[in-house]
Image (spheres, rainbow, N blue to C red):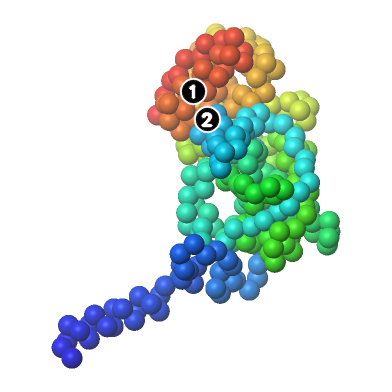
Amino acid sequence: MTVFRWLALLCALLLVGCASPLRQLPSGVDGPPLEPAPDLLNIPDAVPRIEPLRVGGPNKPYDVAGVHYVPMTRDEPLAETGLASWYGRKFHGRATASGERYDVYAMTAAHPTMPIPSYARVHNPANGREVVVRVNDRGPFAAGRIIDLSYAAAVKLGVARGVAPVRVTRLTHADILAQAPSEAPALAEGAAATAGVAAPKELTEQALPAAPAAPVERAYTQSARGFWLQFGAFSRQEGAVDLRRDVAARAEWLAPLLTLFADGRLHRVQAGPFASRGEAQEAAAHAQRSVALTPIVIERR
């Protein structure tokens, strides 16, 4: 055997030895990882954070197998009882509806209509276990099934052997703040970071709302990169505060996105950030119908 053949054989053996057990999968077959992590029960639940609800994108109406689905676009409660399923290594590393990569060991889930992103508490009445997951994908699309859990979440909940009855409760922004009110400023920064932009370095006011149902208040002294909707600019801060509250009251889906920017002598009421100009323009059209105002799209760099 020539030296080149030996080298080719050695490379092939190395590739086989280094292949991830998650990838060794016959086409069309799903299941758990071939070598599951031994400490799945100790994986921490998802930590709820207030994240902007995207307009369009994964929250657009869609059709699957002849069924029309209309995702929620507002921060509203949702509680339902039905069957939970899970998806595994066949989908590991693939893009979810949110654009994030699916990870069998992350505490995530798919839901047909819950706004993306959302957080949900899933309860298994058979054993009393509960988990908190981050909803970042669409599905399941089988009759009677209401949520598709990641493999790790299914193991922790005790439903990894097949479909099982569960109760699913969406955590609203008010629920999240009620559980961790001291973390409200960090939650506001987390919302900007999740949208794919740099979070501002300084907040000029605390993000604690006056009441649990009130929107998280954010005011930045520095530019937060991304595309924003501007509803107005005022020389006095009181005017900007009044407009922000008015817009939040008339469009609940905008409430967690509304921000006061202190730019020189002006106080600007803006909502965002959005990942692209097209997404911001779509949100502007939706906002015009919701609040009877026509915001302008600006880009902060």
Counting residues from the start of the chain, the first of labels 2 and 1 encountered is 2
Secondary element under disc 1, as helix, strand or loop, is helix
Q: Residues within 10 Å of mark 2 (few under 14, many from 20)?
A: some
**Depth order, front residue of 125/62:** 62
Residue that numbered label 2 is attached to:
56
Q: Is residue 159 visible?
A: yes
The residues tagged by marks 2 and 1 sit, at their Cα atoms, a distance apart of: 7 Å
Q: Position of residue 151 (x, y in %)?
A: 62, 61
Helix, strand or loop for disc 2: loop
Please tell me which residue is depicted at 55% across the width and 13% down the height of the picture: 288
Q: Is residue 239 left or right of residue 266?
A: right
Q: Position of residue 131 (x, y in %)?
A: 73, 54
Q: Determine which quarter of the picture holds residue 231.
A: top right
Q: Amino acid at mark 2?
A: Gly
Amino acid carrying mark 1 in the image: Glu
At label 1, counting other C-alpha atoms closer than 10 Å, the crowd grade (few under 14, some 14-19, many 20 or more) is: few
- Asked whether the viewer can see residue 200, the reply is no
Residue 135 falls in image quadrant? top right
Compared to residue 236, the image places residue 155 above or below, namely below
Q: Residue at x 64, y 32 (%)?
A: 72
Q: Which residue is mark 1?
A: 282
Q: Are marks 2 and 1 in contact (CB under 8 Å)?
A: yes
Q: Position of residue 13 (x, y in %)?
A: 34, 81
As drawn, 196 above or below 244: below
- Observer-nearest residue: 176 or 188? 176
